[in-house]
Amino acid sequence: MDGRKDVRLASVLILFGLSIFALSSLCFGLIVDTPLNLLASAALLTTITLLVFWLTSIWFAQPNDADSVCWEALHQSLVVWRQALTEQDDMRARRFYEQGKGSLSLVQTSEPDCQQLKRLLQQLSIKSEEGDWQVELAYQVGVLSAVNPFTIPSVRLAIWVQTLWQLWAIIAGALAALIAWSEVEQLPLRALIYAVSGGTLGASLYNLRTLADHIAVQRDYSTRFWVDYLTRPFLGAVLGVVVYAFAVGLAWTLTLQSPTGTQMPKVVFALGFLSGYALRSVLTWLNGIAKTVFRPAPSPSHEQSSSSEG
């Protein structure tokens, strides 16, 4: 079973290398003024290798074998048990504890192949001699917190795939900024590319930091969040465009003309990076602006009740 996962990881690594090579070749062709037909071929090769890499890695990022199912159930138990430890109300804490035991009961009916998971289940089956649920809770949280998700083969494959996603986005963002710096002379277009690359880089670096935290510190990594890791760099790029639009609109409002300063691309790159890194905060801020500007109209029934009261 482990050998099969090693083959899958090797295939993803090969596809990752091919897509990076194709992307680098395309960027190199743009820098050295390659003929248009060769550029079109490089762009087509980049698109094909990228699609194959992303589709293959998406399939491997969501494992569905006994080990991954077991780990996800243990992850859910760890999350709710940690909530139980911090809960001040004993009744709510007991409900969280029972909820974690429900997830654990699903694990105990499975037969994982990973020896680490088998030993973990044996440790979790040990009952407290005192019969105190709070003592058992503290013991089980301690056992689960000591397990590194990277030791589970299925989970390790998903972690590698999601790490490669972020590395690909970082390399693509850096190459885009390099092309804009060396080849794009129009400041507005250069600033736009900087904003997109900055947002991509910020979001990808945040993902890498989050991965490291959930693997090495919190020990509660879950493969269910693969969509979040996949889409965050794209959302960061979109937010970079939004930041660029805000910067241009603000500059035009203050000066009544389009911004032309040579420092603008650098400023927009920094703002795009920050917006990608703090993506959730920026989305919350934009959501607040949208609610303020576009307030929902009262329903007809509410209008009728207000008029009848008047």
Image (cartoon, rainbow, N blue to C red):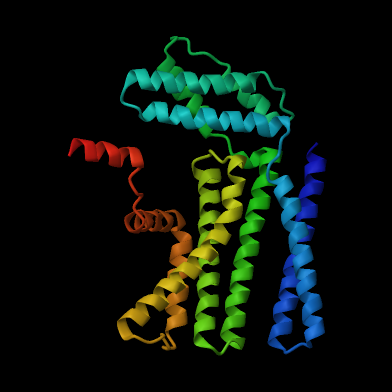
* Above/below status of 250 relative to 82: below
Residue under the image location 22 percent in, 36 percent down: 308
Residue under the image location 65 percent in, 39 percent down: 151
x, y percentage for residue 239?
A: 48, 64
x, y percentage for residue 243?
A: 44, 69
Q: How many marks?
A: 0
* Above/below status of 61 relative to 120: below
Q: For this view, does 2 lie left or right of residue 162?
A: right
x, y percentage for residue 2?
A: 78, 39
Q: For this view, does 45 lie left or right of residue 100?
A: right
Q: Quadrant of residue 125?
A: top right
Q: Is residue 270 visible?
A: no
Q: For this view, does 76 lie left or right of residue 132?
A: right
Q: Quadrant of the N terminus?
A: top right
x, y percentage for residue 303?
A: 29, 42
Identify which residue, 56 or 132, lies in the foreground. 56
Q: Is residue 121 visible?
A: yes
Residue under the image location 47 percent in, 10 percent down: 129
Identify which residue, 228 or 121, lies in the foreground. 228
